[in-house]
Amino acid sequence: MKPFLHKELTNRIIGIYYEVYTDLGFGFLEKVYQNDMFYELQRQGYEVEAQKPIKVFHKGVIVGEYFADILVENQVLLELKAADKLALEHEYQLINYLKATNVEVGLLFNFGANPEFKRKIMTNDKKPLLKLLS
């Protein structure tokens, strides 16, 4: 396992998260935070993609499609929440996004009353879904 995978990039993204949180505070809908994160990341020169489609396969058949909030530099998935606090299901949502893609690092941000984030790493060699597709 690579515990510091994309460390410099994720640390900078976390810094941008705190900038956005400080500027906007809490109480907005998730979409407002997504738009501002997208804008700030793009303004600071990062390649970003909003609403990144993620297809879920089972035995070679698409069984679902989700949309990750933001993909940064094709390396880090961002999942944003505006909730009272992060819940286990939020973490599993991000983990499942990582399982279904070749992206190995994800950041889960909460824009609730108390800002919080989680960093998740899942290397591609640990992803059974990807092995089935290759």
Image (cartoon, rainbow, N blue to C red):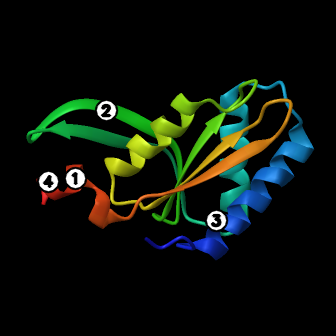
Percent of width and height locating residue 124: 32, 64
Residue picked out by circle 1:
128
Q: Residues within 10 Å of mark 3 (few under 14, many from 20)?
A: many
At x 31% / y 47%, what residue is drawn? 100
Q: Disc 4 or 1, which lies upstream in sequence?
A: 1
Q: Quadrant of the C terminus?
A: bottom left
- Judge whether 38 appears above or below 16 on screen: above
Percent of width and height locating residue 32: 72, 33
Q: Is residue 132 left or right of residue 9?
A: left
Q: In the image, what residue type sits under mark 3?
A: Thr
Q: Residues within 10 Å of mark 4 (few under 14, many from 20)?
A: few
At x 76% / y 43%, what residue is drawn? 116
At x 28% / y 55%, what residue is drawn? 127
Q: CA distance from mark 4 to mark 1?
A: 9 Å
- Judge whether 55 appears above or below 128 on screen: above
Residue picked out by circle 2:
65
Residue picked out by circle 4:
133
Q: CA distance from mark 4 to mark 3?
A: 28 Å
Of badges 1 and 2, the one in the foreground is 1
Q: Disc 3 or 1, which lies upstream in sequence?
A: 3
Q: CA distance from mark 2 to mark 3?
A: 25 Å
Residue picked out by circle 3:
10
Q: In the image, what residue type sits under mark 4?
A: Leu
